[in-house]
Image (cartoon, rainbow, N blue to C red):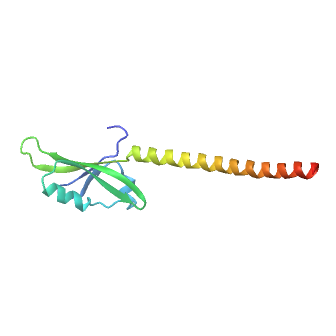
Amino acid sequence: MSGVDATIFSPNGYLLATNQVQIFDNLILSNLINPNVISRIESKESGFILEETIGKLHYNDSYRLLRSESTGEVLGVLSIPFFNSGDSLDRSRIVILSNTLIVFVIIFLLFTVLSFITTRWFTFRFG
């Protein structure tokens, strides 16, 4: 799982292992799992995705129960965060389109004022 941020929590929701040590050491995230995950575990869901936030940052987190092959007992919960790139791409396209329209409106207004001044200048000279 090269390049994947993964975290494993105990069935009770306590952090067991992570490859994102700095996020937990700097207290950006708690060492406890999202309480909504515990309720989903208790309702016997084996995998699900939740939308989460840190400040203004919105992201999705995929959760999967880790079970014992022999007993089926829940040994832990695997958490893999990811961004919804489709929404980000749509927002980027909207920003680019908005900026392009603003530039063209400014150019249109500039040429309108310039043509008005030029017309007044020509009519003043010949009039």
- Spot occupied by residue 90 in the image (x, y as percentages of width and height): 45, 45
Residue 115, percent from left and from top: 78, 48
Compared to residue 85, the image places residue 12 above or below, namely: below
Query: How many labels were placed on the picture?
Result: 0
Direction top: furthest residue: 2
The residue most toward the left is: 71
For the residue pair 99 and 58, the one nearer the viewer reads as 99
In this image, 29 relative to 45: left or right? Answer: right
| x, y percent for residue 55 | 41, 62
Q: Residue at x 10, y 41 (%)?
A: 69
61 and 1: which is toward the camera: 61
Q: Nearer the viewer, residue 90 or 29?
A: 90
Tell me the residue at 88%/50% (across/down). 123
- Residue 12 visible to an observer of this rendering: no
User: Is 12 left or right of 84, judged from the image as shown?
Assistant: left
x 36%, y 52%: residue: 59
Looking at the rendering, in which quadrant would you find the N terminus? top left
Residue 13: percent from the left, percent from the top?
21, 58
The answer to whether residue 2 is visible is yes
Q: Quadrant of residue 72?
A: top left
Residue at image position (34%, 47%) is: 19
Residue at the front extreme of this rendering: 127
